[in-house]
Image: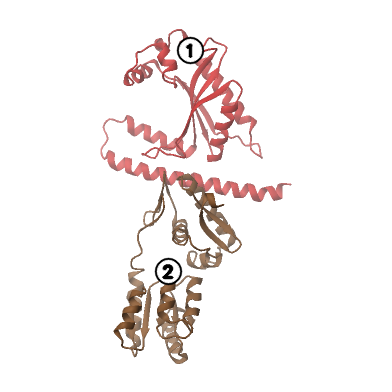
Amino acid sequence: MDRGIYGPYADKLDAVLDIVIGAVKACGDSAAGPHGERRYEHIEGRVKTGESMRLKLERRGLEATAENALTAVYDAVGVRVVCRFIDDVYLMADLIARHPGIRAVERKDYIARAKENGYRSYHMIVEADTPFPGPVGGGAFYAEVQLRTIAMDTWAALEHEITYKRELSRRDLIWEELKRCADELAACDVSMQAIRDMIRESGERTDG
Amino acid sequence: MRILIAEDEDDMLDVLEAYLTLSGYETVTAKNGAEALARAREGGLDAAVMDIMMPVMDGVEALKRMREEGMDVPVLLLTAKAEVRDRVAGLDAGADDYLTKPFAMEELLARLRSLIRRGTPGTPDTVRLEEMTLDIRQGILKCVNSIALVGRETELLALLMRSTDREISEKEILSRIWRDFAGADGETLKLYVRYINGKLSSVGARFRVERRPGGMRLCREAEK
């Protein structure tokens, strides 16, 4: 893999990714539900390829240096946390932000304020402490953590497919339908959260 | 189909009730305007036939109050007087049609069918409340975000958005929206209130449905 753009940090990025994923897992395991259920469905992560990083810097009008790749943009290391319920998304976000060695430097709540096209997700830029000399200062590296429900994740997969498909007939129709779908999925997420709350409340009385 | 008949003369009331029942309608009766208003508040009506000249509260006054309270049920007024002024007052108060006594029962039935067929005239497809918009036909609630609503959620939220000035009893909601479907009860409403509150929060609206012993009402969050 061509990670030349990351300069001296290139061979550390996989380890940085593991550190962030480890922290996220620890958060989820520490907050298991009343019946031991995990707060996340799955976690995935990636180091941005040298090529897409180069393109991103170019789009932003930035010089292709290791410094810029790791401190001017924040998603060289990216982690996605997919949860079952909306409440779990917010719970995980809070736990991650408070986890030792992790600091949230920016949060964007696209669930409370969905993007125009219907995209919903909770984005957080974090600074993660590592044992390596980092580009931020101390041993810190930036990483982007995206948290969302399974429904939001499936929707985003479709959106990604449309965005990167060059030849597409009836693009307008597909976008319109995808927007409607986003509203329906959001409705489903809310309904399932409400039903879970109701079950939990009546369970509190009988579980003892 | 449930029809309210408001008429103070017993003979006339009996005849109307008999004809409407025979024609397959379910009937609810009232003997004066105040009773008519009380029956209308219980909800679940598809149309109302109301006499203008009634004791305690006349038909025009009862109709005016029904409209003020946001009830949009189609109303056919009956008038004994052939006075233009009466009919104008009735139509201005929100009547959808009128008949002058004496009338042929066939005509009353035909006019009633026509009113019900037309549905509630003037009922808009969207309800707005400050920053919120509910598209009733599409079942989409919009504020900062948008979200889909399903059948009864749409009806319930539309009712609540139109009646922020009063508390709506569970009985009225079950009768108007669940049309007294036997499986629906207070627990059903509790769950629907959760759905709606979740969706209001999801679109970034500052309103929430509050449940109180007397019923429910849509309130600004700050009012809690």
> Do residues under tags 1 and 2 come within 8 Å of each other at their CB atoms?
no
Q: Is residue B109 visible?
A: yes
Q: Chain of mark 2?
A: B
Q: Quadrant of residue B123?
A: bottom left
Question: On the image, numbered disc 2 is attached to which residue?
Answer: B68
Question: On the image, numbered disc 1 is attached to which residue?
Answer: A135
Q: Count residues near mark 2 (Cα–Cα under 10 Å), then give few for <14, some for 14-19, many for 20+.
A: few
> Which is nearer the eye, A199 or A106?
A106
* Residue B194 screen position, x and y as percent: 54, 52
Q: Are marks 1 and 2 on the same chain?
A: no
Q: Residue furthest bottom?
A: B11
Left or right side of A199 for B78: left
Secondary structure at numbered mark 2: helix
Q: Is residue B110 visible?
A: no
Q: In the picture, which quadrant includes the N terminus of chain A?
A: top left
Label 1 amino acid?
Answer: Pro
Is label 1 or label 2 in front?
Answer: 2
* Residue A191 screen position, x and y as percent: 51, 48
Q: Quadrant of residue A129?
A: top right
- Chain A drawing hue: red
Secondary structure at numbered mark 1: loop
